[in-house]
Amino acid sequence: MRLIMYLSDFLIPILIFYIIGFGLLSKAPVFDLFVKGAKDGLHTAKTILPTLIGLLMGVGILRASGFLDWFADLLEHGSGVFHVPGPLIPVIFVRILSSSAATGLVLDLFREYGADSYLGYAASILLSCTETVFYTMSIYFLAAKVKKTRYTLPGALLATGAGVAASIYLAGRI
């Protein structure tokens, strides 16, 4: 275990030095290529910024308006069939849109129920094994100029459902 911890501390610096060393040995203009990559990265960030602002604003409006609480109350009765706790429902739906907003909801759950509670465990595992589907799709497909998403959304939502089921099951096993 100690060896793995030691290696993990040095893995990224070793990787960076390897890339720079390989570039120097192959006589590539390392710094010029770095600057070009940074410029491309800034262009990508400029392209996706409006989408990012729109998603964050939409989640903020949903949270501040009380819609998420109403939606959780609406679904809480039917969620018992799947053993999904009611307070976890807003986290599940917000996680599909925004990771930071879902983290805020999880912190609220921690304050109310405790981090070591069943809900705390389930929310923590949920954030670890699900993805921000719409955020990821909009950002990466916009950056790559993908127009037809085909089966991406159904597949991503299916994977999110599997992550939710796994988090509820695993939290119950702790």
Image (cartoon, rainbow, N blue to C red):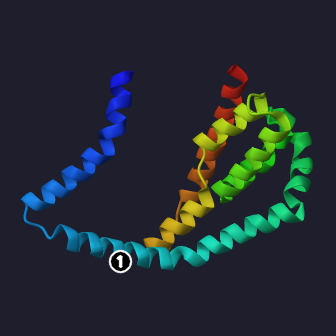
- At 60% across and 63% down in the image, what residue appears? 135
Disc 1 element? helix
| Residue 65 horizontal/vertical position (percent) | 88, 65
Q: For this rendering, which residue is in front, 162 or 20?
A: 20
32 displayed left or right of 163:
left
Tell me the quadrant of the picture where the N terminus can be found. top left
- At 64% across and 36% down in the image, what residue appears? 125
| Residue 4 horizontal/vertical position (percent) | 36, 28
- The amino acid at mark 1 is Lys
| Residue 114 horizontal/vertical position (percent) | 79, 33
Q: Which quarter of the picture shows residue 121?
A: top right
| Residue 78 horizontal/vertical position (percent) | 88, 41
Please count the marks in the image: 1
The answer to whether one can see residue 52 in this image is yes
Crowd class of label 1 (few under 14; some 14 to 19; many from 20; radius 10 Å): few
155 displayed left or right of 74:
left
- Above or below, 25 against 13 in this view is below
Q: Which quarter of the picture shows residue 82?
A: top right
Tell me the quadrant of the picture where the C terminus can be found. top right
- Above or below, 147 against 7 in this view is below
- At 56% across and 75% down in the image, what residue appears? 49
Give the residue pinned by disc 1: 39
Q: For this rendering, which residue is in front, 38 or 122?
A: 38
40 displayed left or right of 168:
left
43 displayed left or right of 116:
left
- Above or below, 30 against 92 in this view is below
The answer to whether one can see residue 148 in this image is no
